[in-house]
């Protein structure tokens, strides 16, 4: 064997020995297998031409081995595992601010409610110039570097210097870091007198509780009879979270999902309690970015004829991962079973052609026209027919097929818009606009008030800003100008009223939202 392959072979054998022989299946390797492994390790250690970084080889081998199993079995270093768990646990430890980097300066978009920065009086629009006496303004700082400087263990302290545009002097705060909650229910509000809207971005530890609180707030109006749950772009998360959330929508011990694997018996999850919205019209929005737990919820609603699904074919992830933590603090999520919707569908898309083809599948949907034409979708999936409780036909394989298809909006495909988006100029301009006009914008008493009454034409200012940043204007039609105004308005609204402002503005021209509202008007099941 060529010597260049010896480190990789060593890594593979060592990974197999560590993971399978020790952590996952103790005693599972034969004694002869162990002897060969140790013999190979000794041989490389004694005679290989170069020194070998055992840890890097281990990690590379582990990643390669898991990738050969399926696309969703993954390995994490200790640092990667910490970040991955923070995203699902719904919290992190830090000072508690949302920020953006504007003109090479860290600007506070908003202090997080309940966090230490909010309690100290740090405000939206504040510029953080120094951290522990180190200048961070005008030095090309990145988001990752900001995280490293401002996040840290609970109860530790960090000193920040702040420039506030309307203050006469530099402000200095000593902030004691704390646990900061990260919401997974981005927003909730009424679209009209009877219709509520809830946007769920992922299924984390507290998602079910956040969803219940959102429902209580909407029901407190006394008029809620219809609900739109937006799962677009939601990559999934904890199985327990989606089970609890679905239980708020389904009654009479209806089946939500079941799982089954080679070494895992069939486990059924059913609605167990009286939910907050078991009656009333329901629409779930999905798209090609809706995966895993999002597909479980959409499938449960669809198969039980509890509501209707609107949008485009979902991602197609029907594999269930179980976390395993290794002794050195690293870990992996290993696929242990598949999940099945109540009608018996497993909607996992094929992965037998390898990881590269699997990752490319979403691009293929663009290329083959599936995202634009409904009739191309069914041919792209397994057409095996399953039946809902009321006998409606649904399909397995490749994702959840919506009851009503909404094509991706292509009316704004334009080189100029692409250039603006690629350089993040719309967001940068909107942040700057909101910052300059913060006092004026406060005259709007709410996000709903702003959505109704703000009609400023900002396109000319955006064009000038883009030109100053190297993107020259070109000819376009009226619809593109409307699009740019809407995007700026939505991002400005987010700067002041967070996600509620953004989604309220977008809802006015969102084709999928408009289809959902129309579907609710003609609701029949």
Image: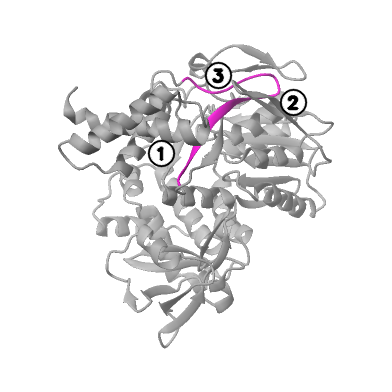
| Residue sticking out furthest to the top | 384
Q: Which residue is identified by label 1?
A: 412
Q: Are marks 2 and 3 in contact (CB under 8 Å)?
A: no
Disc 3, SS: loop
Mark 2 vs mark 3: in front: 3
The answer to whether residue 317 shows anywhere in this view is yes
Q: Is residue 64 above or below residue 148?
A: above
Question: Residue 120 or 83: which is nearer the viewer?
Answer: 83
Query: Could you say where residue 401 lies in the image, as x and y percent from the top left?
Result: 59, 23
Q: Residues within 10 Å of mark 3 (few under 14, many from 20)?
A: many
Q: Which residue is identified by label 3?
A: 397
Question: Which residues are the magenta region?
Answer: 330-350
Earlier residue among tags 1 and 2: 2
Disc number placed over residue 320 in the picture, else none: none
CA separation in Å, label 3 and label 1: 31 Å
Query: Could you say where residue 451 lies in the image, as x and y percent from the top left?
Result: 58, 56
Name the quadrant of the C terminus. top right
Q: Which residue occupies 30% across, 30% down? A: 39
| Residue sticking out furthest to the left | 49
Q: Residues within 10 Å of mark 2 (few under 14, many from 20)?
A: some
Q: Which residue occupies 50% across, 26% down? A: 28
Query: Could you say where residue 384 lies in the image, as x and y percent from the top left?
Result: 60, 11
Question: Residue 125 or 10: which is nearer the viewer?
Answer: 10
Q: Is residue 7 above or below residue 426?
A: above
Q: Which residue is identified by label 2?
A: 305
Q: Quadrant of residue 130?
A: bottom left
């Amino acid at each position: 064997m060529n010597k260049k392959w010896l480190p990789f072979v060593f890594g593979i054998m060592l990974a197999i020995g560590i993971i399978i022989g020790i952590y996952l299946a103790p005693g599972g390797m034969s004694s002869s297998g162990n002897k060969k492994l140790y013999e190979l390790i000794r041989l490389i250690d004694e005679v290989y031409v170069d020194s070998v970084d055992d840890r890097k080889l281990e990690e590379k081998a582990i990643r390669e081995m898991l990738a050969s199993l399926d696309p969703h079995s993954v390995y994490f270093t200790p640092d990667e595992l910490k970040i991955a768990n923070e995203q699902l646990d719904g919290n992190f430890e830090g000072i508690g601010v949302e920020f953006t980097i504007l003109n090479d300066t860290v600007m506070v978009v908003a202090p997080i409610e309940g966090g230490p920065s909010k309690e100290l009086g740090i405000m939206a629009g504040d510029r953080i110039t120094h951290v522990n006496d180190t200048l961070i303004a005008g030095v090309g700082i990145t988001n990752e570097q900001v995280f490293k400087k401002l996040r840290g263990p609970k109860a530790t302290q960090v000193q920040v210097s702040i420039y506030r545009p309307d203050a006469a002097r530099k402000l200095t705060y000593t902030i004691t870091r704390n646990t900061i909650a990260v919401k997974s229910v981005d927003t909730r509000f009424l679209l009209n007198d009877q219709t509520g809207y809830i946007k769920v971005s992922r299924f984390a530890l507290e998602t079910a509780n956040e969803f219940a609180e959102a429902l209580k707030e909407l029901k407190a109006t006394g008029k809620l009879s219809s609900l739109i749950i937006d799962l677009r772009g939601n990559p999934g998360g904890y199985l327990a979270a989606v089970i609890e959330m679905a239980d708020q929508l389904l009654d009479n011990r209806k089946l939500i999902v079941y799982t089954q694997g080679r070494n895992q018996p069939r486990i059924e999850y059913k609605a167990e309690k009286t939910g907050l919205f078991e009656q009333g019209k329901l629409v779930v929005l999905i798209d090609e970015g809706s995966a895993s737990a999002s597909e479980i919820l959409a499938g449960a609603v669809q198969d039980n004829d509890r509501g209707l699904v609107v949008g485009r074919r979902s991602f197609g992830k029907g594999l269930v991962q179980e976390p395993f933590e290794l002794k050195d603090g690293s870990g992996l999520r290993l696929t242990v079973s598949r999940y099945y919707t109540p009608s018996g569908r497993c909607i996992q898309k094929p992965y037998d052609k390898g990881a590269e083809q699997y990752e490319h599948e979403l691009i293929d949907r663009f290329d083959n026209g599936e995202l634009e034409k409904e009739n191309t979708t069914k041919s792209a999936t397994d057409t095996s027919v399953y039946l809902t409780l009321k006998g409606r036909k649904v399909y397995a394989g490749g994702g959840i097929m919506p009851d009503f298809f909404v094509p991706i909006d292509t009316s704004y495909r334009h080189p100029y818009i692409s250039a603006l988006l690629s350089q993040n100029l719309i967001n940068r301009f909107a942040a700057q606009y909101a910052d300059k006009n913060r006092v004026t914008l406060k005259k709007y008493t709410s996000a709903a008030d702003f959505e109704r009454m703000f009609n400023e034409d900002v396109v000319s200012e955006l064009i000038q800003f883009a030109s100053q940043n190297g993107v020259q204007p070109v000819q376009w039609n009226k619809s593109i100008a409307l699009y740019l105004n809407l995007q700026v308005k939505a991002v400005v609204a987010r700067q002041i009223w967070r996600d509620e402002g953004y989604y309220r503005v977008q809802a006015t021209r969102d084709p999928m939202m408009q289809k959902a509202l129309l579907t609710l008007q003609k609701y029949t099941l």
